[in-house]
Image (tube, rainbow, N blue to C red):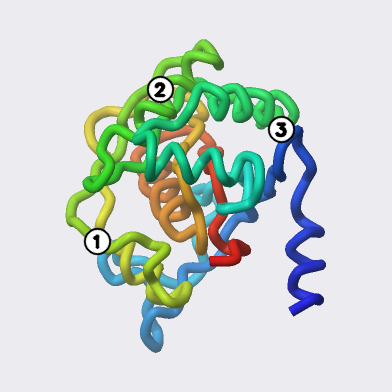
Amino acid sequence: SPCHHVLALAWRLPTRRGWAVRMPVAPLWPPLNIGSGFAGLGVRGRIPEDLRAEAGKVLCIWGDAGWGEIVRRGKYTDGRFSDELVSACATLLQGWNPQPPPAWVTAVPSRRHPDLVPDFARRVAETLHVPFHMALAKTTERPEQKTMENSAQQARNIDGSLAVVGALPAGPVLLVDDMVDSRWTLTVAAYLLKAAGSGPVFPLALASTAHADE
C-alpha cells in the first residue's frame, strides 16, 4: 500500500547507490505455539537484554537498482560477492561506527552456499584489520528463509538449526549474512554467540527481502 511504502522509506538511510537499512532488535521470542517460543532452543517470552543482538544494518533492499542488483548477481550468477560490495560495507561501517567496535567478524553458515557468505565476511574483516572466525555451524538442512510465507514459519524454520562451534574470540563481533527478512536467523545466531560468551553482536546483512517487490 502507499502508506506501507512511505513507512518503509522512512527507515532507509541514503548511501551512494541504494539504501542502508537500520535493523531493529527483536525483544521477544515468537509465540510459535500457545505458551511456547523456540522449542529447539528451549526459550520463550522476552529475550534477555544481555543475550540480544545490537541494532544492525542492511546495505540495501533486495532487487532494488544499484546495490540490490549487484547482490543478486553475486549470489545467483557469479557465486561470489564483489569487492565493490566489500567496499560499500566498509563505507557503511565507517558511517555507522558501532560501539564498542567489532574485534572480530563471523558469518551465518549455509549448507547450500557454504563459501559464499564466509568468503565475503572474511574480506570485510580484512578491511577492518580484525580476524575472521567461523563460529557458527548449520546443524540441519532447512529451506531458505525467503521461501517461508510469514515470520512464524521463518522462526520455526530456524529453530534448532544453528550451533556455536569451538571457543570464541574475545570482544564484540560483526555478524554477517547475505539476506535478511524476519531477522530470526540473526536473532538466534546472536543469542547463541552471546550465550557462548561473545561480546556485543552487531548484525550486518547485504540485502533485506522484507520490502522487496518479489
Count residues near mark 2 (Cα–Cα under 10 Å), then give few for <14, some for 14-19, many for 20+: many
Q: Is residue 200 left or right of residue 39?
A: right
Q: In the image, residue 183 lies at what x, y percent?
A: 50, 58
Q: Which residue is mark 2?
A: 122
Q: Mark 2, mark 3: which one is toward the viewer?
A: 2
- In the rendered image, the residue lying farthest to the top is 129
Residue count near mark 3 (Cα–Cα under 10 Å), binned few <14, some 14–19, many ≥20: few
Q: Nearer the viewer, residue 210 or 2?
A: 2
Question: Which kind of residue does numbered mark 3 sit on?
Answer: Trp
Q: Name the secondary structure under disc 3.
A: helix
Q: Quadrant of residue 158?
A: bottom left
The circle drawn on residue 142 is 1
Earlier-in-chain disc, 2 versus 3: 3
User: x%, y% of residue 113?
Assistant: 28, 42
Residue 22 falls left or right of residue 190: right
User: Foreground residue, 164 or 178?
Assistant: 178
Provide residue 164's location: percent of width, then percent of height.
28, 41
In the picture of the structure, the residue carrying the numbered disc 3 is: 96
Q: Residue furthest bottom?
A: 34
Vertical position of residue 14 compared to residue 146: above or below: above
Q: Residue at x 75, y 51 (%)?
A: 12
Q: CA distance from mark 2 to mark 1?
A: 24 Å
Query: Which numbered tag is attached to residue 156?
Result: none
Q: Are marks 2 and 3 in contact (CB under 8 Å)?
A: no
Check disc 1: other Cα within 10 Å, few if <14, some if 14-19, many if 20+. some
Horizontal and vertical percent position of residue 210: 57, 63
Spatial CA span between label 2 and label 3: 19 Å
In what element is the residue under mark 1?
loop
Outermost residue to the front: 77
Q: Residue at x 43, y 28 (%)?
A: 121
